[in-house]
Image: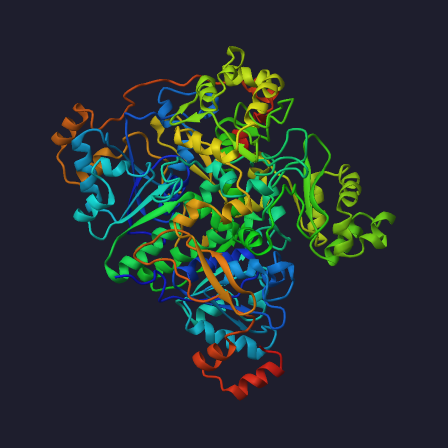
Amino acid sequence: MTGSAFGNYHIIDLSQGVPGGFCTKYFADYGADVIKVEPPGIGDVARRTGPFFQDDPHPEKSLLFFYLNCNKQSVTLNLQTSSGREMLCRLLEKADAMVESYAPGHLAGLGLGYEQLKQLNPRLVVTSITPFGQSGPYAGYQGNDLMYYAMSGLMYTSGAYHREPLKHGHPQSLYMGGITAAYATAAALYAREATGEGQHIDLSLAEATAAHHYGPIARYGYTGLIERRAPKVEGGSFKGTGFEGILPAADGYIGPSTQHGRQRGTLAEFAALIHHPELNDPKFATQQQRQERAAEFDAVALPLLQQIKKYDFFDAAMTDGWVAGVVQTQEDLARCPTLQERGYFTEVDHPVIGKLKFPGEIFRLPGAPWSLRRPAPLLGQHNLEVYCGDLGYTREELVLLRQEGAI
Amino acid sequence: MDGPLSGIRIIDSTTMVAMPTALHLMGDMGAEVIKVDSHTLPRGEGGVFPEGRPGERYWDQDASFNALQRSKLGVTLNLRAPQAVDLFKDLVQVSDVLVENNRAGAMGRLGLGWEDLRKIKPDLIYLSNTGFGYTGPWRSYAGIGRMFELTCGLSQFTGYPGEGPRRVGAAFFDLHVGWTAVFAIIAALEHRNRTGEGQWIDFSMYQIGVATMGDAMLDFIANGRNGRPMGNSHPCYAPHGAYPCQGGDRWIAIGVESDQQWKALVEVMGSPAWAQEEHFGDGLSRWKRRQELDDLLAEWTKSHDSQALMHRLQQAGVPAAAVMNARDEISDPQFKERGFFEKVPHHSDTGIGARVYVGRPWKMSQTPSFIRRPAPMLGEHNEDIIIGLLGRTEDDVEELYDLGVLGKEPANQQPPGRGLPVEKQIEQGTMAGYDPGYRRLLGI
């Protein structure tokens, strides 16, 4: 028997942007009924964030919003109006979870804080996603992707020795926050089976990124040593130690490593892998020697690698049991044979964008598989269905609510 | 105290980082996680030991192992012995979830594949984590977290503008994949609770990493666009970067996302003439002149202390954060007040004392989570599990030790060397420094 994993859950997504959107995407993709509640007129900030379909910054053409919000419904609601607040409460009476990303205290100020919502629906799980959490001296500070990287320790250990610390060039911390919110919310819903009660989850995006620094934190606590970014190796584009950097190939970039199965591979084995036995010079035999003679080694090794096509290197190395990487571009991902063969791409028919190839299944759960049930919603597309159909407002009332700016 | 996942028993037959992370979190959340280890496999290879010196029981003293395996019980089963495979199956029958990360097919060769185990435990949830999944042309390739930054498409955006791509200094996708595994296991438990059915989860690290690149893939599909290294810049906001501060290798990250924040920044700078010029007056103008803006801003930041400036800017409403290292994080008042780093006392036999580990990035109001126990010593819970849980006798267990099925000390002891002296590591640049007061700072 198949069915969906979260098919009996109703989730209200009050959040803005990537973290909450990515969180509820996991639930929506594995069956939950997710309603995005957006401010009237402008909607979720993701609707104003690129990339846009054909670079047209139309509010219904954000590809970021499109990616994050398939399988969800959208209603509009203005929480500054009393009608809007009442409608949200009616939605929450029947909901299992709510995900929100307002600044700490904002919802409580509107009479919608966790303590108040608990009176309304004691089984409700409320997940609050904020930059630094609900408590502590930074609770009121401004956060964004760059701040989370800076505070996480990840920037301090990334980049070139003599240059400024570096973050990822894609706002990855926001996705880390999203998956963190997803598993924590799932755990709280699971706990509810035993306790019968909902609860409040207080999530810090800065901490979700800082969790990645577990190694240097443990090292400091064991030895007092403080890790920093790439060693001082001069010369060439030699960016790490030995073969641990990202190096240019004929048609892109590759990531060789010295890891060969469970062992450290030798230079002789690497030279054989790339069919250039002359690289196996005893003066470069150990990692230490290669590091000490980095510029000299670069002068010999880099031109050899630059003759090899990136996938030729990757396939040869991986087939031979090395652990290697290949820098894939957006194009490479969109055309990846592994993803195609695993049925990763599907097609979505969106009312404004039209038909578009879509990145689908996150992980394979055969008993309760990933499914695509609807395209990303237009702003307020489901007002009628949700407010009249589910909550029992009349169409006349809906018109009045629109005119007073509540929806 | 019960955690959100209390009552679930999980077998952890995994190595590396991603799955151990998933399962220590589930352990923090109250699940009973049994780590199946073997005294025949190497342990203590991480190279980081208390006070930099591997001790007598070096195999129990590895910082990385202890960080990743907390909140778990430990049993040693040498799976090359048929008795161990039988014990493993007995363990499966009393467990809810099995997680493994061997290469595709390896568990099947031991008679411990999904098809074997579903016969004895039909509602088992069985997660196989591999680099690229069980199907597709890359199914036999090995995968490790740090290479997925490249292969999942993240490195193409990462690096200094005008140069080639770079990795960051962490095994980045491991945590994302581990966290997704927590979600997937709970999804399968929900499904089991409703249907009574177990299932096998084909978990591909690559595919899960790629799922964070959805907007980027669609940008190619719809617009034919490929990425390039972005430095610390933002696709539409400026200033946005890391700027130098007073002292060696001290930086502040400032990321202005609105005119209001820009005005606040200008005010904190004392409203210099350059900052009030029309050509920095709105977002698009600032973004177009971001290089010039970065240079001017860096001139101002370099005479400031990064921590003090962070607070001054934040109090004025400007997004700013000091670029922190491990020591800064441990001393940081926000992380401290939220208890993000947890102190864990180890068993006295290990000679480790108490150490500090990263907690979880969230708090739940009703069902508490915390590091429930330190990482197990090798074979620490053999008797609890083999006798207490699986009902074997003390004589049975004694025989299993004699046969080498169980062990409490490594079969091949290869004490690690002491590694490079601290001064040498600092000279080579792999370490920023050594803080002799670290134990005092941590209260250990």
Q: Which residue is more in the foreground, A394 or B307?
A: A394
In the rendered image, the vertical position of residue B247 relative to residue A101, given as above or below: above
Q: Which residue is more in the foreground, B439 or A380?
A: A380
Residue B225 seen in this snapshot:
yes
Residue sitting at 53 percent across and 41 percent down?
A: A328
Q: Residue furthest bottom?
A: A396
| Quadrant of res B90 | top left
In the rendered image, the vertical position of residue A67 relative to residue B398, given as above or below: below
Q: Is residue A7 left or right of residue A53?
A: left
In the rendered image, the vertical position of residue A98 relative to residue A220, given as above or below: below
**Spot occupied by residue B349 in the image (x, y as percentages of width and height):** 34, 26
Residue B359 seen in this snapshot:
no
**Spot occupied by residue A23 in the image (x, y as percentages of width and height):** 47, 57
Q: Is residue B32 left or right of residue B165?
A: left
| Quadrant of res A120 | bottom left
Residue sitting at 62 percent across and 51 percent down?
A: A144
**Spot occupied by residue A301 in the image (x, y as percentages of width and height):** 56, 21
**Spot occupied by residue B41 in the image (x, y as percentages of width and height):** 31, 26
In the rendered image, the vertical position of residue A374 relative to residue B50, given as above or below: below
Q: Is residue B141 left or right of residue A214?
A: left
